């Protein structure tokens, strides 16, 4: 088919380009692109005034603030904890390391609803941990703090798995050179190690943040779902749908989708910039 | 060795390695965090499920609604995982064996479902196929049910798990190049023979790895499926949705019993994944 598609330069002797490329594009369009386009089409059809009215209502704004705020807080916690876990896994040896390394992926493998009810069982006022916090006046479940805890659970592997390979590839020669020249350990970390892993850490944060903004299953059980206070944006979409408020659901989903694409773009820019700088 | 160089080496060692105390503290801190945030929820699932004994656990699972949810979940995975395997292999073949413009855009588009909220992933299919959707009236006229029925759940699941196989295979096949295939072809093998006898054996562990992750997500997906399913007991209730229903009805033992089955699935997935990584050095893209 190369002759009929001159712009597709095929220099491969391997067959099957038309078949696999055609199938890939068709299936991608059918399952992903057309359905995603629907939501923008529907939004465009409702007119700007209506879109702003339902997409940026007070209730929607409160939901965005909560979703983005808790996702950012959880991302920040994970940036610190994930770096620590990645550091320990890459640099040190200790018994059970392989099991711990596998455990880090648990949030990827455990269905979100299961995580949601488990965390609620722990942090509800009568729960395993909640019963000790409740007398101290600390409420976790059914408050934004509970949402942050659920998102910390969900987001941790994104940071660990982003930082781990970069940390492992980091040669010790530069650290040794700096140390021989009299740098202290904190100086070596701050001036040599941290700048090298910063792009990966930022990527991990952005991935965890993006996942947290859209997360639903693990959050709805622990959040309490009070409109305006602990109602996350994905839940508001579901509520609107259940009330047959399709315009509201669509507008809020469009805002979320645009935000998700912006984060995706930011991640790509970070990675391109770090490739340009460190050439990997 | 002169005292000066010995002290320089000592400084170097001290500054490239933490002392035993700092090292122990960092390990302890990391392990405490993991135990608290990852291990404890997992323990809670099993402990709550078995709180009233093994008999109650079995009774909670041996109900018609729970069994039909288990069957539906297995059915959904049995349809959507093979679809994504075919797509993943075809996409990786096109992307890694040929050069064409726009390749990186194609890869980004394949990854797109990863950055869409599960709830929004369900919503887009409601807007297409639902009663008020673009194709809704036509589907109703022809008596085809997609939303609040099994096809809708399959569609949402395929969307959610779309990139899982492809993103494991693309880096692997990129690294392997196409010299093996070219050798087979020059020796007279047909395209299909080359694929079955050369490519497939080369990628089988990576493929298995992708299938594992894809399957775990397909069986565990909650948000997207919740939007399209309609929660009809015995008909469109998957295991994660059944967990939610039981939990909201305060049937905690039942909810945690079904949840513990899903947790076992997660543990088996992690175990198989670890064995694969360890024995066959499959390198996962591994960010979802």
Image (cartoon, rainbow, N blue to C red):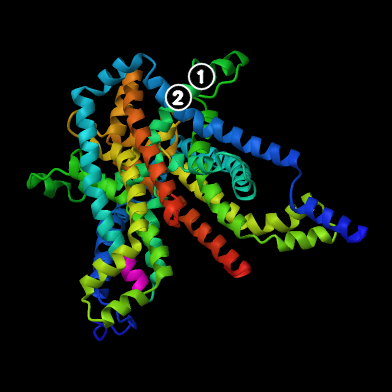
Identify which residue, B119 or A275, lies in the foreground: A275
**Label 2 near label 1: C-beta < 8 Å?**
yes
Judge whether residue B240 can be spotted in this image: yes
Residue B97 belongs to magenta span: yes
Residue A272 belongs to magenta span: no
Q: Please, is residue B189 above or below residue B143 in the view?
A: below
User: Circle 2 sits on which residue?
Assistant: B44
How crowded pointer 1 is (Cα within 10 Å; few <14, some 14-19, many 20+) is rated as some
Q: Please, is residue B92 above or below residue A259 in the view?
A: below
Quarter of the picture holding the N terminus of chain B: bottom right
Query: What residue is drawn where x is 24% and y is 74%?
Result: A18
Residue A128's mark?
Answer: 1
Q: Indicate the position of residue B181 as horizontal and vertical percent values.
A: 31, 75
B57 sits to left or right of A233:
left
Identify which residue, A48 or B256, lies in the foreground: B256
Q: Indicate the position of residue A46 as horizontal and vertical percent values.
A: 32, 49
Q: Chain of mark 1?
A: A
Magenta segment boundaries in residue numbering: B91-100
Query: What residue is drawn where x is 35% and y is 19%?
Result: B252
What is the spatial separation of the Cα atoms under label 1 and label 2, in whole angstroms? 9 Å
Identify which residue, A20 or B108, lies in the foreground: A20
């Amino acid at each position: 088919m190369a002759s009929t598609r001159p712009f597709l330069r095929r220099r491969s002797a391997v067959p099957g380009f038309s078949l696999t490329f055609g199938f890939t594009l068709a299936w991608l369009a059918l399952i992903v692109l057309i359905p995603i386009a629907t939501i923008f089409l529907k939004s465009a059809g409702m007119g700007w005034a209506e879109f702003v009215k339902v997409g940026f209502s007070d209730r929607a704004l409160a939901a965005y603030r909560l979703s983005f705020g808790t996702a950012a807080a959880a991302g920040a916690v994970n940036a610190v904890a994930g770096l620590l876990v990645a550091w320990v896994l890459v640099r040190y040896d200790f018994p059970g390391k392989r099991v711990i390394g596998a455990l880090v992926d648990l949030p990827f493998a455990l269905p979100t609803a299961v995580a949601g009810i488990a965390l609620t069982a722990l942090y509800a006022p009568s729960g395993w941990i909640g019963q000790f916090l409740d007398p101290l006046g600390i409420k976790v479940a059914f408050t934004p703090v509970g949402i942050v805890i659920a998102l910390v659970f969900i987001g941790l592997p994104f940071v660990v798995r982003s930082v781990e390979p970069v940390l492992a590839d980091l040669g010790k020669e530069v650290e040794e050179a700096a140390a021989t020249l009299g740098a202290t350990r904190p100086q070596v970390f701050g001036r040599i190690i941290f700048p090298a892993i910063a792009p990966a850490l930022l990527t991990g944060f952005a991935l965890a943040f993006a996942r947290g903004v859209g997360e639903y299953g693990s959050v709805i059980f622990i959040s309490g779902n009070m409109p305006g206070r602990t109602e996350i944006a994905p839940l508001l979409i579901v509520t609107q749908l259940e009330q047959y408020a399709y315009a509201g659901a669509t507008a809020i989903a469009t805002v979320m989708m645009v935000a998700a694409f912006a984060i995706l773009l930011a991640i790509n820019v970070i990675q391109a910039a770090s490739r340009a700088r460190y050439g990997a | 060795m002169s005292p000066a160089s010995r002290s320089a080496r000592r400084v170097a060692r001290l500054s490239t390695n933490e002392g035993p105390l700092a090292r122990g503290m960092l390990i302890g801190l990391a392990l405490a965090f993991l135990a608290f945030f990852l291990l404890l929820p997992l323990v809670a699932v099993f402990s709550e499920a078995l709180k009233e004994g093994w008999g109650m656990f079995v009774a909670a699972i041996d109900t018609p609604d729970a069994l039909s949810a288990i069957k539906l979940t297995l059915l959904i995975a049995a349809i959507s995982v093979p679809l994504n395997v075919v797509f993943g292999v075809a996409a990786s073949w096109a992307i890694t064996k040929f050069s064409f413009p726009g390749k990186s855009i194609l890869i980004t588009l394949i990854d797109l479902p990863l950055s869409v909220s599960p709830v929004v992933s369900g919503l887009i299919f409601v807007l297409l196929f639902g009663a008020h959707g673009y194709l809704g009236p036509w589907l109703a006229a022809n008596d085809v049910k997609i939303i609040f029925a099994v096809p809708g759940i399959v569609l949402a699941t395929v969307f959610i798990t779309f990139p899982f196989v492809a993103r494991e295979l693309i880096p692997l096949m990129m690294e392997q190049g196409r010299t093996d295939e070219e050798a087979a072809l020059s020796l007279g093998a047909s395209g299909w023979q080359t694929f079955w006898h050369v490519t497939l054996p080369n990628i089988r562990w990576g493929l298995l790895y992708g299938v594992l992750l894809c399957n775990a997500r397909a069986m565990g997906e909650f948000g997207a499926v919740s939007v399209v399913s309609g929660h009809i007991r015995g008909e469109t209730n998957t295991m994660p949705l059944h967990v939610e229903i039981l939990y909201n009805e305060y049937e905690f033992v039942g909810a945690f019993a079904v949840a513990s089955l899903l947790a076992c699935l997660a543990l088996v997935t992690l175990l198989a994944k670890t064995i694969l990584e360890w024995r066959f050095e499959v390198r996962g893209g591994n960010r979802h």
